[in-house]
């Protein structure tokens, strides 16, 4: 049986956070969030981890993580930079950032060789989610069947400010049929609302949302490359346009090329959007350590 691989999107610069969230300590021995993800992946049967990073912090990233990770999995690195584009395309004057999560995943096309999961470096997904994803990748992933770990919206909010989430709709077989990006989501009084064009709209607490935890076949890369070229032709001259992976996946669903199983794992989720989120994340992880779900010292 082919063992799954893990792709960690760690190239973000953390503008709202004010620094590199990927390196920020949250565990009792200064562990970063992504260390818990790699720990969960290793014990769920993943055999390789590939990090998408930026050259500007390559040395700091490797100094913090590389030695420990290589004791448990194969490790590889790829880079996402603004000018890493298909032949024939160039960066428009004035653009400052790379092209989003779909672009980041595409950077790993030569490093991933087996069914793989994709996660954000600064999200804590929980051990049950990794086990559920590993089971899918080992047993059901194929060129026409992908997956997504889903979370309840109420468990993914930040008390420090608004967030954006991909709101998911599924069919009767729990296959994904639509993702709608909602922005400016926050708790107001006893309800949860998102804002659009100056108006507020209610969202149910149990609304299923994507936290960018996907399961794919390596055949995704060929499809993604084609979609990215189409995106650049249409929106490549926009200074802030982004090629998001949920939109790319939805394009493939709409074309009838793939189905996406939505897996509702009973798993905790913690995220860091703002500096003020850190105490709650640290306490959440400390509580899991007290329960014995994680050792006090990971490595």
Image (cartoon, rainbow, N blue to C red):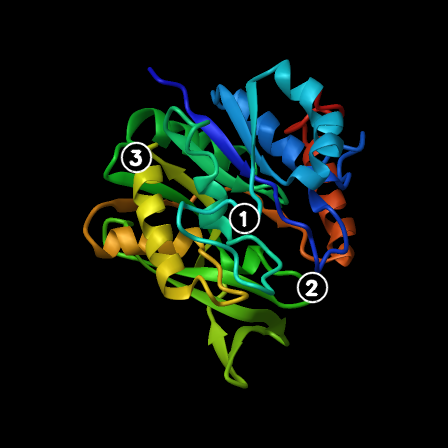
Please tell me how crowded label 1 is: few (under 14), some (14-19), or many (20+) other residues with Cα within 10 Å. few
Q: Can the viewer see residue 261 in this picture?
A: no
Which corner quadrant of the image does residue 290 belong to? top right
- Residue at 41 percent across and 33 percent down: it is 109
Horizontal side of 285 relative to 198 (left or right) equals right
Is label 3 in a helix, a strand or a loop? loop
- Residue at 54 percent across and 48 percent down: it is 83
Q: Position of residue 43 (x, y in %)?
A: 54, 21
Which is nearer the N-term, disc 3 or disc 1?
1
Please tell me how crowded label 3 is: few (under 14), some (14-19), or many (20+) other residues with Cα within 10 Å. some
Task: Name the residue that disc number 2 marks.
Answer: 159
Which corner quadrant of the image does residue 187 belong to? bottom right
Which corner quadrant of the image does residue 26 belong to? top right
Horizontal side of 60 relative to 254 (left or right) equals right
Task: Name the residue that disc number 3 marks.
Answer: 219
Above or below residue 215? Residue 134 is: above
- Residue at 57 percent across and 56 percent down: it is 156
Q: Position of residue 89 (x, y in %)?
A: 43, 53
Above or below residue 14? Residue 110 is: above
Q: Position of residue 10 (x, y in %)?
A: 61, 41
Work out how far the residue at label 2 is from the one at label 3, CA to CA, in angstroms. 39 Å
Is label 1 in a helix, a strand or a loop? loop
> Residue farthest to the bottom?
198
Task: Name the residue that disc number 1 marks.
Answer: 83
Q: Nearer the viewer, mark 2 or mark 3?
A: 3
Picture mark count: 3
**Mark 2–mark 1 CB contact (< 8 Å):** no
Which is nearer the N-term, disc 2 or disc 3?
2
- Residue at 54 percent across and 65 percent down: it is 240
Work out how far the residue at label 2 is from the one at label 1, CA to CA, in angstroms. 36 Å
């Amino acid at each position: 049986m082919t063992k799954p691989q893990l792709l960690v999107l760690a190239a973000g610069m953390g503008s709202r956070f004010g620094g590199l969230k990927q390196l920020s300590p949250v565990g009792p021995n200064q562990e970063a969030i992504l260390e818990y993800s790699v720990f969960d992946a290793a014990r769920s049967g993943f055999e390789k981890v590939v990090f998408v990073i930026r050259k500007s912090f390559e040395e700091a990233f490797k100094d913090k993580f590389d030695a420990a990770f290589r004791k448990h999995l194969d490790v590889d690195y790829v880079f996402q930079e603004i000018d890493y584009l298909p032949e024939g395309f160039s960066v428009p004057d004035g653009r400052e950032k790379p092209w989003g999560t779909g672009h980041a995943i595409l950077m790993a096309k030569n490093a991933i060789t087996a069914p793989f999961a994709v996660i954000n470096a600064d999200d804590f997904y929980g051990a049950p989610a990794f086990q559920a994803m590993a089971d899918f990748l080992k047993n059901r992933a194929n060129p026409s069947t992908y997956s997504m770990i889903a979370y309840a919206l109420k468990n993914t909010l930040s008390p420090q400010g608004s967030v954006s989430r991909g709101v998911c709709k599924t069919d009767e077989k729990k296959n994904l049929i639509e993702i709608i990006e909602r922005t400016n989501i926050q708790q107001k009084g006893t309800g949860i609302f998102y804002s659009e064009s100056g108006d507020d709209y209610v969202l149910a607490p149990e609304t299923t949302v994507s936290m960018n935890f996907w399961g794919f076949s390596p055949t995704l890369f060929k499809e993604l490359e084609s979609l990215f070229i189409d995106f650049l032709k249409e929106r490549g001259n926009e200074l802030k346009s982004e090629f998001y992976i949920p939109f790319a996946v939805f394009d493939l669903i709409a074309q009838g090329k793939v189905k996406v199983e939505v897996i509702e794992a009973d798993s905790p989720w913690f995220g860091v959007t703002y500096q003020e989120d850190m105490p709650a994340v640290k306490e959440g992880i400390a509580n899991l350590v007290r329960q014995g779900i994680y050792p006090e010292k990971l490595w």
